[in-house]
Image: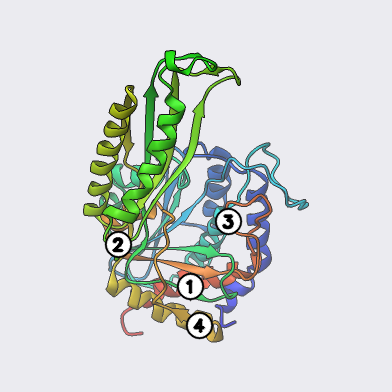
């Protein structure tokens, strides 16, 4: 694998950093131990500026290159998931009910490796802004960092991120121009009927039967209201009601997710959900309300930056290759907010045949860390070459 030699020499360091972070997963914006560890390493590397406390536990480190030039942003997410780890690893999570089940420990280690190399060599013009972000999984830390002005404060003119990809060929890169990940919205439906004895249903107004009809009705939005050429997911994931077998409950709660790429599809879904819920409520003689909670917007790559990133990835990936025509996925990613604020690209880095992300047996493959760090480093050097080189 044609990784940068100096970064290849850091392989053991990156694995050690990653495995330390794997032991201490933290959630949301509360990445305090993680942030302290990252800040300590960055100071050791000799970054020129370190701005902490952004989005509570996020930070931006600045490394100056040679001479004047723009600022390129590189982002890594730092948070874990509320999942109990089942890997049996010697460095498994020490925080009960939490684990790095999505590889953010590895993303952080890769960016730290790139930071150490860039701080040593400085073979680029302008500046690089290293963005370490909390709360990718929950809480939209990317949005918070953008709202707190990191793009303007540090004059970032383009921004990039990579994510590990279980099941994809080891060391391969994959991406696409345009939408690569979906918007992720949440719906809450609350039904109020009239409780009663289960042996006397005629004296009650049953929210359970209404809930079943509403859930089935929502699926008709996909089959009968959506243009078949548009991607759409509506998944009901929770129904909570009742306490025992002989009581018709008074209320019922329904929860789920909607995934879209287009604003007009999203708007259509909201309209039809309101109509279906109101209609079903009327037909059963009870009350039902919809709360639609907007989440992360679609992650939309910029074409010019995808082309450039693919050229750089091709230098690093070698025979593993680079694909720039992958299908979009219906998962979501809050790097979307950074891509709304600045042009850039989001890429996947294959880590071979491993357990999938968000699985209790998942583990980041440390062998891809030098590949990811080399990509970040070469991206900076290629984007902002020193004059005369």
Closer to the eye: label 2 or 1: 2
Residue 228 x/y as whole percent:
30, 63
Q: Which residue is mark 4?
A: 321
Cα distance in 3D space between marks 3 and 1: 22 Å
Quadrant containing the C terminus in the rendered view? bottom left
Residue 185 visible in the picture:
no
Q: Which residue is mark 3?
A: 357
Residue 225 x/y as whole percent:
27, 53
Cα distance in 3D space between marks 4 and 3: 22 Å
Residue at the image position 38 percent from the left and 33 percent from the top? 188
Residue 334 x/y as whole percent:
39, 51
Quadrant in the picture for residue 160: bottom left
State if disc 2 and disc 3 touch (CB < 8 Å): no
> SS class of the residue under badge 2?
loop
> SS class of the residue under badge 3?
loop
Q: Which residue is mark 2?
A: 230
Q: Residues within 10 Å of mark 3 (few under 14, many from 20)?
A: some
Residue 114 x/y as whole percent:
51, 65
Cα distance in 3D space between marks 4 and 2: 29 Å
Cα distance in 3D space between marks 2 and 1: 33 Å
Lateral position of residue 155 relative to residue 23, left or right: left
- Name the one closer to the observer, 284 or 15: 284
């Amino acid at each position: 694998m044609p990784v940068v030699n100096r970064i290849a020499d850091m392989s053991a360091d990156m694995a050690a950093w990653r495995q330390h972070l794997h032991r201490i997963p933290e959630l949301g914006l509360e990445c305090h131990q993680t942030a302290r560890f990252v800040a300590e390493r960055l100071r050791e590397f000799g970054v020129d500026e370190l701005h902490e406390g952004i989005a509570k536990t996020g930070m931006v480190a600045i490394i100056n290159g040679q001479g004047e030039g723009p600022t390129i942003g590189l982002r890594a997410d730092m948070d874990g998931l509320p999942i109990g780890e089942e890997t049996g690893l010697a460095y498994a999570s020490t925080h009960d009910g939490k684990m790095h089940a999505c590889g953010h420990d590895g993303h952080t280690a890769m960016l730290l490796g790139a930071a150490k190399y860039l701080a040593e060599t400085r073979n680029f013009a302008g500046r690089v802004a290293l963005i370490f972000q909390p709360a990718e999984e929950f809480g939209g830390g990317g949005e918070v960092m953008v709202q707190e002005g990191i793009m303007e404060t540090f004059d970032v003119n383009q921004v990039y991120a990579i994510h590990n990809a279980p099941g994809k060929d080891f060391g391969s890169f994959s991406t696409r121009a345009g939408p690569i990940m979906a918007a992720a919205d949440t719906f809450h439906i609350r039904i109020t009927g009239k409780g009663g004895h289960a042996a006397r249903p005629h004296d009650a107004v049953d929210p359970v039967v209404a809930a079943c009809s509403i859930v089935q009705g929502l699926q008709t939005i996909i089959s009968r209201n959506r243009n078949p050429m548009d991607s759409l997911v509506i998944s009901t994931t929770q129904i909570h009601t009742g306490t025992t077998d002989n009581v018709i409950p008074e209320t019922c709660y329904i929860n789920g997710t909607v995934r879209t790429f287009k604003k007009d599809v999203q708007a259509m879904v909201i309209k039809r959900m309101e109509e279906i819920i109101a209609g079903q409520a009327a037909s059963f003689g009870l009350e039902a309300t919809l709360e639609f909670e907007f989440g992360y917007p679609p992650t939309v790559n910029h074409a010019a930056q995808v082309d450039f990133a693919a050229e750089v990835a091709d230098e690093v990936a070698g025979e593993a290759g680079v694909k720039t025509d992958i299908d979009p996925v219906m998962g979501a990613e809050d790097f979307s907010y950074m891509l709304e604020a600045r042009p850039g690209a989001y890429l996947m880095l294959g880590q071979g045949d491993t357990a999938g992300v968000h699985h209790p047996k998942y583990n980041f493959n440390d062998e891809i860390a030098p590949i990811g760090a080399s990509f970040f480093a070469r991206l900076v050097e290629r984007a902002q070459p020193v004059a005369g080189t």
